[in-house]
Amino acid sequence: MNILVIGSANADMVIRTDKAPMLGETVSGHDFSVNAGGKGLNQAVAISKLGGKVSFLGLVGNDANGTMLKNTLNEYKVDFSGKALDGVSTGVAVITVVGADNSIVLNEGANGCITPEFIEVNRELIENADYIVLQLEIPVATIVKICEMAKGKAKIILNPAPYKELPDSVYKATDYLIPNEHEAKDITGITLNSRENCIETVKKLKALGAANVIITLGDKGSVYSYKNDVIFHPSENVVAVDTTSAGDSFIGALTVMLCNGKTLPEAINFATKVSAITVSRKGAAKSIPFIDEVL
């Protein structure tokens, strides 16, 4: 099956520190690095490393960061179907890692140029896809356009991150809606601090129109809708080092398993193992395991 990821590609500027700075405070950091990242790129790399055939439709700047991102996609055998733009910088994420957690500041750069017009130019690519994976690091109007073009032709997997308000039509076009607990709260207003609240949130998200809902809960695992039930799946017991690509690796793994004809519970079980390996390593795309490592 043909998988198409449409979304962001960023140069991740990562610094580790033992204490998150307060506003106006300066703290010492260490282990600074610049890595390939962005939710779209990470998810495309995850799909390819886990055995899926995937194309990535996105934009970068015609600069050193853009070259680094294109080289990364090529290294991991992802077909780059976008282009490099003159006069605009590649997207950048400034990531502060404290312990195993992180905070991120984004500059969208070329990602903001992924417009409905750009999508229209690539209509054939979208109409030939079996699965389309989306996130919200590109304009909402573009997400709406993709859903209009793909509805009834491809399965749409939507990771609503970072949270943005979406029209009802997007939820109704979505086959698999995969927020984390914070994004789920932003959408529904419900804090996921109990089993009952998790169940209520899944049902409320399904009521928006998504065919399937999976909420990732960090070290508490995940909760998802399956047929007429709401099911909890535990996390794997690992020591977390860096959670930067945990959700992206989960979504990539889930997509590959669904394309391979696995049931949703089987796909989630596999995706949980993939994300567990990912968080035990430093980095974004490079921390995602290959299929042989998972097996």
Image (cartoon, rainbow, N blue to C red):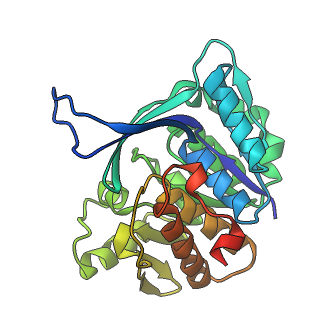
Name the residue furthest top: 87
The structure residue drawn at horizontal position 64% and vertical position 58%, both measured from the top left corner, is 46
Residue 196, horizontal then vertical, whole percent? 25, 81
**Residue 216 position by quadrant:** bottom left
Q: Is residue 95 above or below residue 265?
A: above
Residue 225, horizontal then vertical, whole percent? 47, 79
The structure residue drawn at horizontal position 67% and vertical position 52%, both measured from the top left corner, is 44
Residue 32 or residue 266, whichever sits in front: 32
Residue 180 or residue 199, whichever sits in front: 180
Q: Is residue 83 above or below residue 227?
A: above
Q: Quadrant of the C terminus?
A: bottom right
Residue 260, horizontal then vertical, whole percent? 75, 75
| Residue 285 visible in image | yes
| Residue 217 visible in image | no
Residue 239, horizontal then vertical, whole percent? 39, 69
Q: Is residue 163 above or below residue 192?
A: above
The structure residue drawn at horizontal position 66% and vertical position 32%, both measured from the top left corner, is 68
The structure residue drawn at horizontal position 49% and vertical position 65%, both measured from the top left corner, is 209
Residue 242 or residue 190, whichever sits in front: 242
Left/right of residue 22 with respect to residue 227 in the rendered view = left
Residue 65 or residue 169, whichever sits in front: 65
Q: Quadrant of the N terminus?
A: bottom right
Number of dots carrying numbers = 0
Left/right of residue 216 with respect to residue 253 in the rendered view = left
